Structures are given as structure tokens and as C-alpha cells.
């Protein structure tokens, strides 16, 4: 097995790595570091967030630095101030034994005067966000004329944030640049465009198939109506005592509002978004890393610089607009070989979005039910009992207070004392959840294939001419609605139409979710069927024909008039 000691690193770096307790390099480090040490060249490193990319480029950079030279030799560009600070902090640890080494970080959100003073101390390595670096170039506060090594970290994210022109300008201002090292989670056309313009004969290193997520992540989704999202979030937090995670929102406004509501309810959370000044954001990150916060509520850009190995859960309060962003979010958990859970709260109309992300990340997501009140109470009961069972009071605690405790509870029965203790812990939870409503969208039996005493016969305008048989039709309906195919019975497929039975409490759910579907480019029409004599042999000699309900929003389609627009979702998503 490869170890850091097998790399031909300079002695000071080997010592620092040993002091930090690093032994086995990650896959991207194993592939990249030997090449960059012995045969530096332009490279592209493709690896997901949390795979050790900072050391993959940071150690070779420091290996080649000449500490006796007092000008900028290495430039690292990163998309956010948090990531910029993190890179500087990690590289400073790697170079802690290199006397004379100076590493400076420059980023927005703080006074530029202090950073200009830091640059006057002649750092050999500068870590920068593109916007602040251009500001410093315009002020002639930094000179990149002698930079030999440039690293573009999280290149795909910098391009997604609109930094393409800034990157072009910065690279054009490094005339002595010998090597460009580009690291990215994905190889988009934009990333390849940067490589073609500014890199020569690059070598590509990849540690995973593009757009796959960590196999140690359990991807779960919970279906609820849009207006119940916040209550669903609360329910999941209460059902997961001991959670240490990130709650992702799409907007800064949602981030602030959700965190404020949770804080008022007693949850140990804090927002993290771009409207907060750098001092406040740094304070939030410090509290989160110290685990005085159980969760942070963050936007995608603000969370970019969070590098914590112990995050247990990522919760998508809403799915991101861009499916690829999902891989960045979920990659915040299950780091350093650990396992993690990524939960997504979705509305019924977003099930097709989940299916698209599944194809992108090449993993099947698990549909889970939002727990009911009794389940939350039971989960927290066992959590508190386990905490009590494994508690280890300080040795002097018993000596100091034993007499007082024995006197207070001398007449209290042991069982009664336990009930009192647990009740104090659970009282608020019981009050909140004793009459809790069911937050799951759709009908109750859909996930379990439960049967219903009342069955409804359904009509659909697809048949044998569409290449369907009973099994294929049932599977198409199940996939389109996230139902169990076992609840679809007595399927009759005719030439241009078909009929099938479903439980009565599933009929409306199916109609709603099939309303915007297409099959091979043809719009699907589906409604309850009306029995009449003759025709369909599946009904005991009776034929079934579509019968749109009076005033139904589906009835105009069956009359051949009106038009229903396509449902929501990602641009270009596959539709039937």
C-alpha cells in the first residue's frame, strides 16, 4: 500500500505530514503527487469534493518552492473566501517546518488594506479568489510576472459562478507561468475550454467516473406537499437526534428565514450565506467545527469552503436548480472514508427530478416516509436512554453531591425516578408530536402496496401500438408516479388504449401525477373509466370507456380542446 513516506518529498514536508498523522494518501493524491514531484507538467485532476485535492496540489507546490526567493512563485485560485482560507490554513500546516515560507490569502469581504500589507511581506504562495486578485492587480499591489505555478481549484465551480473572464485575465497576467494544474469535480465544456486556451499537452487524472457520488452516501428522499416543507424539515431533525449536518437552501432569503425559525424553536443552528460579512461567517464556521451548532443552514456558494470530516447528514430543503450541484451538496458528508446520509425534501411533482439526478450520479435513491409523531417520540426516547446508559459523570461529582441526591430521592421508587427523568427530557417532544399530522404526500398505502376495499377502473390512451404489454404498462405507471407496481391490477391492453384497476385512494394521486407525462412524444391521457355493456372482456363482458368527471381539470383534454402546459422540472430532462 502506498504511503506518504514513499513519496520523494523534501524532508520538511515529510516531517510535517508525520506530525499531522497522515499515513495513507487518498486515490487522487496517489495518482497526482508522484507525477508533480518528479516530472511537473500541466495536469487536470478530476475528483469529487472531499477527496484530498488540497494536499494533492499543495504538497508538490511547497516541494518546488524556493523559500530564499522573495516574490510570488505559486498562485492558487479558488471560488469562495471560505475555501481560500481553508487552503491557506492547510498549506500552512504542510509547510510548518519550512523556515522562511510565507503563504498569504486574499479574498473579498474584508479590508483590502490588511491584505496589501500582507503582500508586502513577500509571500512565495498566494491563495486568492478571482475578484479580489483582480482588484489587487489593478491597484498594482501584487505582481504575478514571476509566477511559475498556477492552480485552479474547483474550476467548474468558478466557471459556474461567472469567473471565466476573470480567470482569462489572471492567466494572461502570468507570463512566466510554466505549469497549470486544474482540479475539478466535473469536466464540463467550459473547463475543457480553459484547458485548451491556457494549457499544453496536459495529462488527465481521474479517480472516479464523471458525475458519480460517494458510494458511502445513503441517498433518501421524502415526499410532502410544498407548503409542508418546513414542518417536514423539523420532523426529520427531531427524528435524527445527534445530527451534525448542513441544510441547503436555494436562496439567501430562505437560508435566513429558515434558520431564524429554527433558532426560535430552540434548535442549535445558524445561517451561512453571502450577505453575511466575513467576520460573522468565520464565527459561524468556527462554532460549527467546534460542534456548538448541530447544523448550519447554507446556500451553495457559502458552503463551498466547508471541509469537515464528521458531517453525518446533508438535507436538501429544496433540490438545486442544476442537478450537478446535488453531487457537491451530498459530497459534504461521507468524507475520509466515513458513511453519511443525504436527505431531500421534495414535492410530488419533483419525483421526476429525483429520477434525473439518479441517472446523473448512477445511484438509486431510497424513498422514505416522513416519520409520524409516535415514531419521533420513540426515537428520542431510545436516544435519551442510550445517553444516560453511557454517561460517565466526573469522579468528584458523586462525592460532592451524593448526600444531597440520596436525601432528595430516598423515598422515590427507582421506576418512578426513571419515569420522571425521561419525562423531563421528552415532555416538549410529546407535547409537540402527540397529535402530529401525517406529512407524507399521496395516499397512505402507495409505498407498501397496500390494498383497498374500493377499486377504481382507469383508462389510459396507450396500447399495443405503443409497444406496450400489461407488464410494461404497469411499470411505466409505477415509474411515473413512484408507486409500487403491485397495486396495479387487472391490466387490459388493447390496440390504442388500455384499462387497469387501482385502489380508490390512489386514483386521484395517479391522475395528478400522470397529467403532464408523455410516452414516446405523445401526451398521456388518463382518467377513470365508465362501465358500459359489451366490449372489454376484462370486465365480465362489459366495456370501459373514459369518463371525465364534471368540471374536472382533465376533462378538456378528452373533449379535444384546451392545453395543459408541461410540468416543472429541470431544463432538458427526459420525458416520456
Image (cartoon, rainbow, N blue to C red):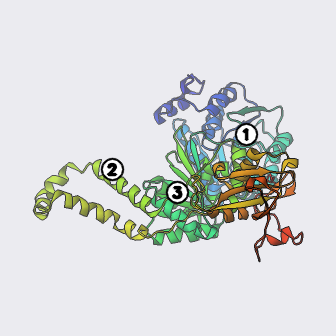
Alpha carbon separation for disc pair 3 and 1: 30 Å
Pointers 3 and 1 in contact (C-beta within 8 Å): no
Q: Position of residue 453 (x, y in %)?
A: 58, 61
Q: Which residue is mark 1?
A: 210
**What is the C-alpha distance between the residues marked 2 and 1?**
41 Å
> Which residue carries the number 2 mark?
386
Crowding near pointer 3: few (<14 within 10 Å), some, many (20+)? many
* Image quadrant in which the N terminus is located: top right
- x 63%, y 39%: residue: 53
- Expressed as whole percent of the image width and height from the top left, the position of residue 39 reads 72, 25
**Would residue 125 be seen by someone viewing this image from the given angle?**
yes
Q: Read off the residue under disc 3.
A: 285
Who comes first in sequence, dot 2 or dot 1? 1
Image quadrant in which you'd find residue 321:
bottom right
Query: Residue extending furthest bottom?
Result: 551
Where is residue 55? Give x, y as percent: 60, 37
The reply, left or right, for residue 149 in relation to residue 50 is right
Q: Point out the frontmost of discs 2 and 1.
A: 2
Amino acid at each position: 500500500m502506498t504511503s506518504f513516506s514513499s513519496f520523494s518529498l523534501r524532508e520538511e514536508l515529510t516531517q510535517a505530514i508525520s506530525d499531522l498523522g497522515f499515513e495513507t494518501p487518498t486515490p487522487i493524491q496517489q495518482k497526482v503527487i508522484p507525477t508533480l514531484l518528479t516530472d511537473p507538467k500541466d495536469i487536470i485532476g478530476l475528483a469529487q469534493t472531499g477527496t484530498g485535492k488540497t494536499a494533492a496540489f499543495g504538497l508538490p507546490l511547497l516541494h518546488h518552492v524556493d523559500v530564499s526567493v522573495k516574490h510570488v512563485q505559486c498562485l492558487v485560485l479558488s471560488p469562495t473566501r471560505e475555501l481560500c482560507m481553508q487552503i491557506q490554513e492547510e498549506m500552512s500546516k504542510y509547510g510548518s517546518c519550512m523556515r522562511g515560507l510565507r503563504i498569504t490569502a486574499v479574498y473579498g469581504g474584508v479590508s483590502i488594506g490588511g491584505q496589501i500589507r500582507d503582500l508586502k511581506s513577500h509571500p512565495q504562495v498566494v491563495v486568492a479568489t478571482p475578484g479580489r486578485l483582480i482588484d489587487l492587480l489593478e491597484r498594482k499591489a501584487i505582481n504575478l510576472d514571476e509566477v511559475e505555478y498556477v492552480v485552479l481549484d474547483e474550476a467548474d465551480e468558478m466557471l459556474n459562478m461567472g469567473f471565466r473572464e476573470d480567470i482569462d485575465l489572471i492567466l494572461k497576467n502570468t507570463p512566466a507561468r510554466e505549469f497549470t494544474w486544474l482540479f475539478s469535480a466535473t469536466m464540463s465544456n467550459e473547463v475543457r475550454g480553459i484547458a485548451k486556451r491556457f494549457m499544453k499537452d496536459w495529462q488527465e487524472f481521474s479517480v472516479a467516473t464523471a458525475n458519480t457520488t460517494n458510494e458511502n452516501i445513503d441517498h433518501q428522499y421524502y415526499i410532502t406537499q410544498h407548503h409542508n416543507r418546513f414542518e417536514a424539515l423539523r420532523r426529520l431533525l427531531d427524528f435524527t437526534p445527534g445530527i451534525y449536518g448542513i441544510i441547503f437552501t436555494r436562496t439567501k432569503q430562505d437560508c435566513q428565514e429558515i434558520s431564524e425559525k429554527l433558532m426560535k424553536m430552540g434548535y442549535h443552528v445558524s445561517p451561512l450565506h453571502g450577505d453575511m460579512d466575513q467576520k460573522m461567517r468565520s464565527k459561524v464556521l468556527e462554532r460549527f467545527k467546534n460542534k456548538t451548532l448541530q447544523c448550519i443552514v447554507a446556500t451553495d456558494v457559502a458552503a463551498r469552503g466547508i471541509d469537515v470530516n464528521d458531517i453525518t447528514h446533508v438535507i436538501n430543503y429544496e433540490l438545486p436548480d442544476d442537478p450537478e450541484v446535488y453531487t457537491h451538496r451530498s459530497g459534504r458528508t461521507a468524507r475520509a472514508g466515513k458513511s453519511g446520509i443525504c436527505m431531500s425534501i421534495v414535492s410530488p411533482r419533483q419525483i421526476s427530478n429525483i429520477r434525473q439526478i439518479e441517472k446523473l450520479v448512477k445511484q438509486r435513491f431510497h424513498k422514505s416516509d416522513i416519520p409520524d409523531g409516535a415514531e419521533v417520540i420513540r426515537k428520542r426516547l431510545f436516544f435519551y436512554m442510550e445517553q444516560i446508559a453511557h454517561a460517565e459523570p466526573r469522579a468528584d461529582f458523586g462525592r460532592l453531591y451524593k448526600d444531597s441526591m440520596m436525601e432528595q430521592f430516598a423515598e422515590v421508587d427507582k421506576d418512578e425516578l426513571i419515569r420522571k427523568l425521561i419525562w423531563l427530557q421528552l415532555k416538549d417532544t410529546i407535547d409537540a408530536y402527540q397529535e402530529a399530522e401525517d406529512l407524507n404526500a399521496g395516499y397512505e398505502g402507495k409505498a407498501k402496496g397496500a390494498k383497498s376495499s374500493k377499486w377504481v377502473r382507469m383508462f389510459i390512451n396507450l396500447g399495443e401500438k405503443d409497444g406496450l404489454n400489461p407488464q410494461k404498462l404497469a411499470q411505466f405507471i409505477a415509474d411515473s408516479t413512484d408507486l409500487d407496481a403491485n397495486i396495479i391490477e387487472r391490466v387490459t391492453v388493447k390496440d390504442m388504449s388500455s384499462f387497469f384497476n387501482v385502489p380508490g385512494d390512489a386514483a386521484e394521486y395517479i391522475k395528478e401525477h400522470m397529467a403532464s407525462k408523455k410516452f414516446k412524444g405523445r401526451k398521456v391521457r388518463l382518467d377513470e373509466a365508465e362501465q358500459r355493456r359489451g366490449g372489454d372482456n376484462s370486465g365480465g363482458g362489459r366495456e370501459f370507456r373514459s369518463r371525465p368527471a364534471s368540471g374536472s381539470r382533465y376533462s378538456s383534454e378528452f373533449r379535444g380542446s384546451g392545453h395543459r402546459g408541461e410540468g416543472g422540472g429541470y431544463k432538458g430532462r427526459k420525458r416520456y
